[in-house]
């Protein structure tokens, strides 16, 4: 299951908890990725909607890898500049396969996780259309 | 009845609609001018699985989700 947080993710507490949970499970590498909200385009922050049933369905294939453990957390609602909206950690026996998994996992996440991002500017919540990607089979209900 | 949810920026309340196929649903949803624009780039999931064909049969209690372009992280 994806861990979800209203607002920014408590980064250090979450990483600490994951570390404690898996440090004796035979993994020699824990590679965290901390996604921080940047102060681009004069935004005050970002905001997110999640479709949780499908997000968890998507995450299943990454949860049950034979040679790695992946933990993930994501925010919903408002996350201000400097806070963290996406956090994950890959545990593997050695670092090399861990870096590989991290890259593949984040790429798949960006393309397929059912999450919608908005810019927060002057109190307005504006859909980040320019950064959004169509899911596979998009447009299936389009009128011919 | 099928429950149709409109995710993310579409900003429309869920609907309970009496349809038997996605084809029928397509006709009904395209009558809404605002929704029509979103349908051009939205994917469709039935019970949390993205579908690739309109021939999917819908049964009572199925959940359909209209999913506009995504951007997590």
Image (cartoon, rainbow, N blue to C red):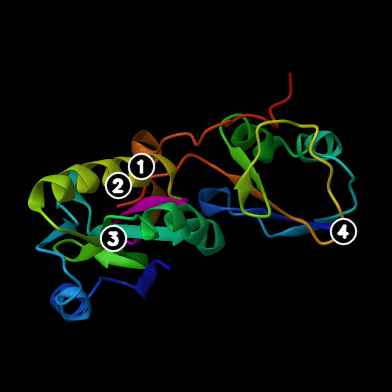
Q: Position of residue A4 (x, y in %)?
A: 38, 71
Q: Position of residue A123 (x, y in %)?
A: 33, 62
Q: Are the numbered discs 1 and 2 placed on the same chain, yes or no?
A: yes
The span shown in magenta is A114-124
Which of the two discs, 3 and 2, labels the residue nearer the N terminus?
Answer: 3
* Residue A23 lies in quadrant: bottom left
Q: Position of residue A134 (x, y in %)?
A: 48, 34
* Residue of label 3: A70
Q: CA distance from mark 3 to mark 2?
A: 9 Å
Dots 3 and 1 on the same chain: yes
Q: CA distance from mark 1 to mark 2?
A: 5 Å
Alpha carbon separation for disc pair 3 and 1: 13 Å
Q: Which residue is mark 4?
A: B60
Which secondary structure, mark 1?
helix
- Pointers 1 and 2 in contact (C-beta within 8 Å): yes
The first of marks 3 and 1 along the sequence is: 3
Q: Is residue A3 left or right of residue B9?
A: left
Neighbour class for label 2 at 10 Å: few (<14), some, many (≥20)?
some
| Residue identified by numbered label 2 | A105
**Badge 3: chain ID:** A
Residue at which label 1 appears: A108
Choose mark 3 or mark 4, whichever is in front: 3
Which residue does the image show at 64% across and 35% down from the upper left? B39
């Amino acid at each position: 299951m994806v861990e979800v947080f209203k607002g920014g993710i408590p980064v250090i507490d979450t990483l600490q908890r994951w570390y404690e949970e898996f440090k004796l499970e035979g993994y020699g590498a824990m590679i965290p990725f901390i996604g921080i909200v940047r102060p681009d385009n004069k935004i005050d922050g970002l905001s997110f909607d999640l479709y949780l049933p499908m997000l968890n369905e998507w995450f299943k294939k990454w949860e049950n890898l034979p040679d790695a453990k992946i933990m993930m957390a994501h925010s919903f609602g408002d996350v201000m500049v400097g806070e963290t909206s996406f956090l994950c950690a890959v545990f593997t026996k050695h670092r090399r396969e861990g870096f590989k998994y991290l890259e593949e996992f984040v790429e798949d996440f960006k393309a397929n996780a059912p999450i919608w991002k908005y810019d927060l500017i002057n109190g307005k919540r504006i859909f980040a259309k320019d950064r959004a990607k169509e899911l596979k089979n998009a447009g299936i209900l389009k009128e011919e | 009845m099928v429950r149709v949810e409109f995710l993310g920026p579409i900003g429309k309340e869920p609907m309970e609609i009496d349809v038997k196929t996605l084809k029928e649903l397509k006709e009904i949803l395209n009558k809404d001018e605002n929704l029509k624009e979103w349908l051009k780039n939205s994917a469709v999931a039935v019970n949390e699985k993205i579908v690739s064909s309109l021939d999917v049969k819908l049964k009572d209690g199925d959940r359909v989700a209209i999913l506009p372009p995504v951007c997590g992280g």
